[in-house]
Amino acid sequence: MKNARAYILLDIVDGKEAEATRKLSSMPGIVIVDRLEGTPNVLIMVEAARRQQLAELTNSALAAVGPLTQEIRLMPVQANGRHTIARKGATRTSN
């Protein structure tokens, strides 16, 4: 089970968004790569089984697009940040 997660907002150099998203999409641990309107212009989500592995995967991803990146905003999810979402007729637990 993967329980360590981080969201990263990237401001990629104009005209290099497609290259950056292509590189990131093929990397281990990257589960979401979305291009955004405005700046920052790319959102990625990295997942791993342990926080140490998360750090390693995140560093590799950032190194791969470092020359294409103007700004980085790293937002790690709190450890053990589970909460329950209740909806009419269903309850589910999310990480």
Image (cartoon, helix red, strand yellow):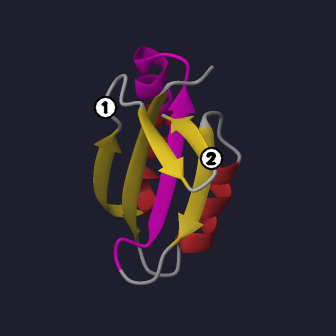
Residue at 39% in and 61% down: 10
Q: Quadrant of residue 80?
A: top left
- Of badges 1 and 2, nearer the viewer stands 2
Please provide percent x and percent y for residue 33.
59, 58
Q: Which residue is mark 1?
A: 78
Residue at 47% in and 60% down: 43
Q: Which residue is mark 2?
A: 90
Tell me which numbered mark, 1 or 2, is placed earlier along the sequence. Answer: 1
Q: Tag 1's secondary structure?
A: loop
The answer to whether residue 70 is left or right of residue 66 is left
- Seen from the viewer's position, the closer of residues 89 and 37 is 89
* Residue 94 can be seen in this image: yes
- Seen from the viewer's position, the closer of residues 35 and 21 is 35
For badge 1, the amino acid type reads Gln
**Is residue 65 rendered magenta in the image?**
no
Measured along the vertical axis of the image, is residue 79 above or below residue 6? above
* Local crowd size for mark 2, using a 10 Å CA cut-off: few (<14), some (14–19), many (≥20): few
The answer to whether residue 75 is left or right of residue 7 is left
Residue at 28% in and 54% down: 73
**Residue 18 image label:** none
Please provide percent x and percent y for residue 94.
52, 37
Magenta residues span 39-57
* Local crowd size for mark 1, using a 10 Å CA cut-off: few (<14), some (14–19), many (≥20): few
Q: Give the alpha-carbon distance from disc 1 to disc 2, as whole Å.
A: 25 Å
